Amino acid sequence: KQCSYGCLHFGDCARACPFDAIYMSEEGLPVVIEDKCTACGKCVEACPKNLFELHPVSQGMIVFCRSKDRGPVSRKACKNACIACGICSRACPEAIVIENNLAKITNYKKIDPDKIPEIEKCPTDSIGRLKKEDEG
């Protein structure tokens, strides 16, 4: 079963990018090449499911999942679905909440860098750093 909130794997985003900053992975998911991305927004406009959002890398963390389905339902469709377990929101309640069965970062400036390892204990990896090389 495919996630109703997930990528359709059409590659519209990659074709729309005038800078060749997006390619489709072997799993059929878009991968952004940060060094090539100019944040022009063409991918945002092209995505038929409105899955793309522009985020400054300085923001640090992102919730990768978009599913608002309850945990068991979303997990059947995707191994990386947010299951609303609350690990991230308990680690940093001033910045992360669970809303509509999905983790939501409400204030990026209030993410305590010391809490990032706790936040990253997400059992499905549905929340994490924007850039893996930022890992300490």
Image (cartoon, helix red, strand yellow):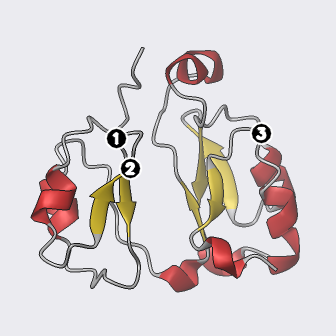
Above or below, 106 relative to 90: below
Q: Earlier in the sequence, mark 2 or mark 3?
A: 2
Identify which residue, 102 or 78, lies in the foreground. Answer: 78
- The residue shown at (77%, 39%) is 123
Q: Residues within 10 Å of mark 2 (few under 14, many from 20)?
A: few
Q: Is residue 102 above or below residue 127?
A: above
Element assignment for label 3: loop
**In this figure, which residue is indicated by the disc labeled 3?**
123
Residue bearing the label numbered 2: 25
Q: Which mark is residue 120?
A: none
Q: Is residue 135 left or right of residue 50?
A: right
As measured in the structure, the alpha-carbon distance from the residue carrying label 2 to the one carrying label 1 is 5 Å
Q: Is residue 27 above or below residue 111?
A: above
Asked if labels 1 and 2 touch by Cβ distance under 8 angstroms, the answer is: yes
Q: Amino acid at mark 2?
A: Ser
3 or 1: mark nearer the eye: 1
Residue at left offset 67%, top offset 51%: 97
Q: Is residue 110 above or below residue 16?
A: below
Q: Which residue is at the front of the view, 123 or 115? A: 123
Residue shown at the point (69%, 80%) measured from the top left: 134
Alpha carbon distance from label 2 to label 3: 23 Å
Q: Secondary structure at mark 2?
A: loop
Question: Which residue carries the number 1 mark?
Answer: 28
